Image (cartoon, helix red, strand yellow):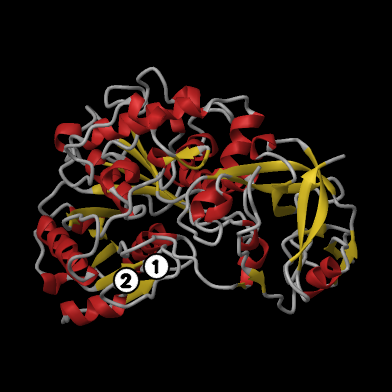
């Protein structure tokens, strides 16, 4: 077990309003989320002395304009003018989960006391994956000439591999989309709050990149979320009940850029990350009361469930049936609606829900008696990170 | 069958690691990087051997026969360059001679519904311009 198990906790969390497209600069969303997280903690802004984010704009063909389409650490520093700022970082290799892990490490190292991590996501006007241009350079020279444009197709190919080698049926995925949408009806911050989805809606929806139909893809939105992390001893003195980090891990499997479609790389990525999370936390999949697994595309959940060890390889679409992932099921899953129903703000939403479930603060959608709360915060293949939060360390 | 005649494919831009691949393709030869230390064949090209971390890599011709490892059928018309061909099959091929090396392609000369995991395919070459010829795939004959 990890010597720093449960020594760092997440305290406050914050959300901005979520809109379909950008009507105000993204910096305003980020600021709203950060202020809300600090307020939720019961702290003053001047207490904050650490900042971390992963600012990438995943939409291709759109300019990264700081404060408008991304919100860098530099931008946040300019807005907050923190008098006691002592540490900051922007991560690159493992998405927003990496920023949370770096903040955890900084707290353990004693270089800051209260760290804020935010993820702000822009939804550009026009086509999300804007792929004009006559040439394909870098990794794209081996994929773009064949029509592989956005990440959806790269994810879809591994999914056909999974479906056909396991003799599975994509229609079973309706259960995931519909259950997550049901959960989103209990989450006022979800983009699809107030908009239910039926099995028929899923089965009749238009195909985007087979096997993905429209409801296998998360909905691009403009918005931001944020959390405050601090050492466990300090967290206990703050307003909300803390969620302690029992363990974390990151994707350690190597993948060459431009090599797409490898199902085994998803599995290796997920296993490498979760293995250390289980080992560090001392828990096993059977101990988990509630799970959030990143769902930028629905199939990521399938790879996650299998590679993290919740079910056997090839069985995830059967595993999610029969009420198992409902709030009162054996493994309540993506209880906030997931990115499919809450909107594309990458994995910090999943981390926040993991925190709220562990600390008993998830309101109407609270899983009864939940303590061990698992989060897979990105697709396991390249940027995957995993976490376990607990409300009561044991 | 997908109509590729109105599609404007992005033209690959070779770099120092990938130029021998495209030079070979221009001669209608499929050439992959082989590690001179351990014999591993890999694609896409990389500065080191992904198996043994060797740095002595040379491109060698390989037989263009393999199987569809995975595929997707594209319906979305967001990419206007490819919109005229929708729906079309983009496939990932694992060569018989190079397990683990994954090549992207389209399934040519067949309806997109013929794309299935495990189906044998063979390389064909599609000239884009005087400099660049694309390796592509069709069902094995």
**Relative to residue A20, is residue A122 depicted above or below?**
below
Q: Residue B106 carries which label?
A: none
Rendered image: mark on residue A70 = 2
- Residue A300 x/y as whole percent: 48, 42
> Which chain is indicated by disc 2?
A
Residue for badge 1: A56
Residue A343 visible? yes
Q: Residues within 10 Å of mark 2 (few under 14, many from 20)?
A: many
Q: Nearer the viewer, residue A85 or A269?
A: A269
Dot placed on the residue nearer the N-terminal end, 2 or 1: 1
Q: Mark 1 lies on which chain?
A: A
Q: Bin the neighbour count of mark 1 within 10 Å (Cα to Cα): few under 14, some 14-19, many 20 and up.
A: many
Residue at point 67%, 75% (across, down):
B13
Residue B28: image x %, image y %? 87, 63
Residue nearer the viewer, A129 or A3: A129
A79 left or right of A264? left
- Label 2 to label 1: alpha-carbon separation: 7 Å
């Amino acid at each position: 077990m990890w010597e720093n198990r449960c020594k760092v906790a997440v305290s406050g969390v914050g959300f901005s309003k979520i809109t379909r497209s950008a009507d105000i600069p993204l910096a305003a969303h980020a600021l709203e989320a950060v202020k809300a997280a600090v307020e939720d903690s019961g702290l003053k802004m001047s207490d904050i002395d650490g900042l971390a984010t992963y600012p990438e704009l995943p939409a291709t063909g759109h300019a990264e304009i700081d404060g408008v389409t991304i919100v860098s650490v530099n931008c946040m520093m300019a807005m907050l003018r923190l008098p006691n700022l002592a540490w900051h970082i922007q991560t690159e290799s493992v998405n927003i989960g990496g920023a949370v892990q770096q903040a955890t490490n900084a707290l353990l190292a004693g270089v800051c006391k209260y760290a804020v991590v935010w993820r702000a996501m822009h939804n550009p006007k026009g086509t999300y994956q804007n792929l004009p241009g006559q040439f394909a350079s870098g990794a794209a020279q081996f994929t773009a000439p064949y029509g592989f444009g956005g990440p959806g197709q790269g994810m879809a190919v591994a999914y056909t591999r999974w479906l056909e080698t396991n003799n599975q049926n994509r229609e079973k995925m309706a259960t995931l989309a519909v259950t997550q949408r049901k959960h989103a009806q209990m989450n006022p911050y979800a983009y699809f709050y107030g908009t239910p989805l039926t099995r028929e809606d899923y089965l009749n929806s238009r195909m985007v990149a087979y096997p993905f139909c429209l409801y296998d893809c998360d909905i691009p939105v403009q918005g931001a979320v944020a959390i405050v992390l601090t050492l466990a001893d300090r967290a206990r003195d703050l307003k909300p009940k803390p969620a302690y980090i029992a363990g974390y891990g990151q994707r350690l499997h190597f993948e060459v850029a431009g090599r797409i479609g490898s199902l085994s790389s998803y599995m290796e990525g997920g296993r490498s990350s979760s293995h250390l999370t289980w080992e560090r936390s001392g828990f096993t999949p059977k101990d988990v009361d509630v799970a959030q697994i990143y769902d930028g595309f629905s199939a990521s959940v399938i790879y996650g469930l299998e590679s993290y060890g919740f079910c056997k390889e090839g069985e995830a679409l059967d595993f999610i049936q029969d009420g198992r992932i409902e709030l009162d099921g054996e493994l309540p899953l993506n209880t906030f609606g997931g990115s499919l129903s809450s909107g594309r703000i990458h994995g910090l939403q999943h981390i926040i829900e993991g925190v709220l479930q562990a600390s008993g603060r998830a309101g109407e959608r609270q899983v009864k008696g939940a303590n061990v709360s698992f989060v897979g915060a990105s697709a396991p293949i390249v940027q995957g990170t995993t976490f376990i939060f607990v409300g009561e360390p044991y | 069958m997908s109509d590729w005649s109105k599609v404007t494919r992005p033209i690959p831009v070779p770099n120092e690691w990938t130029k021998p691949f495209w030079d070979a393709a221009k001669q209608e030869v499929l050439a992959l990087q082989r590690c001179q230390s351990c014999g591993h064949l890999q694609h896409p090209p990389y500065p080191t051997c992904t198996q043994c971390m060797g740095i002595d890599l040379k491109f060698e011709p390989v037989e263009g026969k393999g199987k569809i490892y995975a595929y997707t059928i594209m319906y979305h018309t967001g990419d206007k360059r490819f919109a005229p061909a929708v729906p079309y099959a983009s496939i990932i091929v694992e060569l018989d001679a190079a397990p683990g090396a994954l090549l992207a392609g389209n399934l040519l000369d067949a309806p997109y519904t013929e794309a299935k995991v495990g189906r044998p395919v063979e390389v064909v070459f599609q000239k884009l311009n005087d400099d660049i010829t694309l390796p592509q795939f069709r069902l094995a004959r």
